[in-house]
Image (spheres, rainbow, N blue to C red):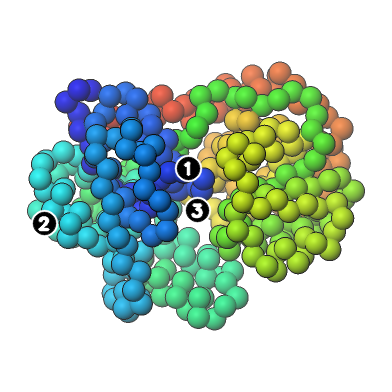
Amino acid sequence: MNDLHLHIISFDIPYPANYGGVIDVYHRIRMLSGAGVKIHLHCFEYGRSHSDELRAMCFSVNYYKRDTSVRNLFRRTPYIVCSRHSNELIGNLLLDDYPILIEGVHCCDILNDSRFADRNTIVRIHNIEHEYYRLLADQERNPLRRLYLKSEARKLRNFEKILAKAKHLITLNQKENDYLNAKFGNATLIPPFHEFDEICSLQGKGSYILYHANLSVPENSSAAKWLTTNVFSKIDIPVKIAGLKPPKELKILISRYKNIELLENLSDNDMRVLIQNAHIIIMYTQQTTGLKLKLLHSLFSGRFCLVNNNMVDGSGLAQVCHIADSPNEFLDKIAELRTKSFTNHETERRNMIINNLYSNYLNRDKVIKIIES
């Protein structure tokens, strides 16, 4: 790999790897760098600090200010795209002819530039973004915020045709792979990268139920409210809800119930311990877009995972989870699982099924093959 160079354009600074999208970006960088790929990382910054960790892994790291000015809301190009336009980035990419891995539709502005028409451009699809934004709009209560999300969803639907200009698309799950191949014919399924090389779930029983997520994301705080109201408030088992920046209304709701504890802004290590020691990890989503990396984290390091069908849609992971959709189904499954011990048999079964799809090493080799093509 001594002569294999790769540009990666990231929508955010991918360290610390403490929320969905950047987890995939960071661990892909880690795996490719470990295989000898010389990575030229380009990050858009808007709140996260520059990283010595990334500098140690990459051949070079460049940062570009994201233009979050209000005027970008009124452009035809989606806000998440035009706010990441950078002439400096384009200039740096044109200094050589190395392949370019673009993280998300967010960073696809360069595909409109004819100077990249002959480059090996690869887009990592993190969501079918127009579907994701439409679903966010459906959940949003603030009328101005809902108007923005609906507008962005329309713009993203129109912008999606830009993906035809990429040489390769890399998707997260089978459903999105089928959708993009039907439209563009250039998609390959490579599931997300993560921090685990093997299953490290503890055997035996835990003493609490856990829901964990980035609670500043409306989708996740909405799920936490639904679970609190319909499930957690109706059981006598201790429940821990953990995540970043929970909104005030969620804090007020949780405070009403003695069996539910809110844990805010934990360190990565504290979160790992919390996941490992839980008896049941519950995950619920109203959206089927992307793949929820907290599901992978929970399966690699937690005990029983109780999820709804949307959480595992297109992931191939339903057979290693327990499934419930209605409040009564969740309550019945909790009653069933609370007395069970997590055994070595469960661990072996997970290893066999998960590592066929989600091995970092196998997926690293697939990415390298695309880079070299």
- Asked if disc 3 and disc 1 are in contact, CB closer than 8 Å, the reply is no
Q: CA distance from mark 3 to mark 1?
A: 20 Å
Mark 3 residue element: loop
- Left or right position of 55 against 230: left
- Left or right position of 121 against 225: left
The residue type indicated by label 3 comes to Thr
Q: Which residue is mark 1?
A: 17
| Residue plotted at (46% across, 43% down) | 16
The residue type indicated by label 1 comes to Ala
Q: Please tell me how crowded label 1 is: few (under 14), some (14-19), or many (20+) other residues with Cα within 10 Å.
A: some
Displayed quadrant of residue 54: top left
Mark 2 residue element: helix
Q: Which residue is mark 2?
A: 114
The residue type indicated by label 2 comes to Ser
- Left or right position of 292 against 86: right
Q: Which residue is mark 3?
A: 289
**Image x and y of residue 267, in percent:** 59, 43
The mark that comes first in sequence, 2 or 1, is 1
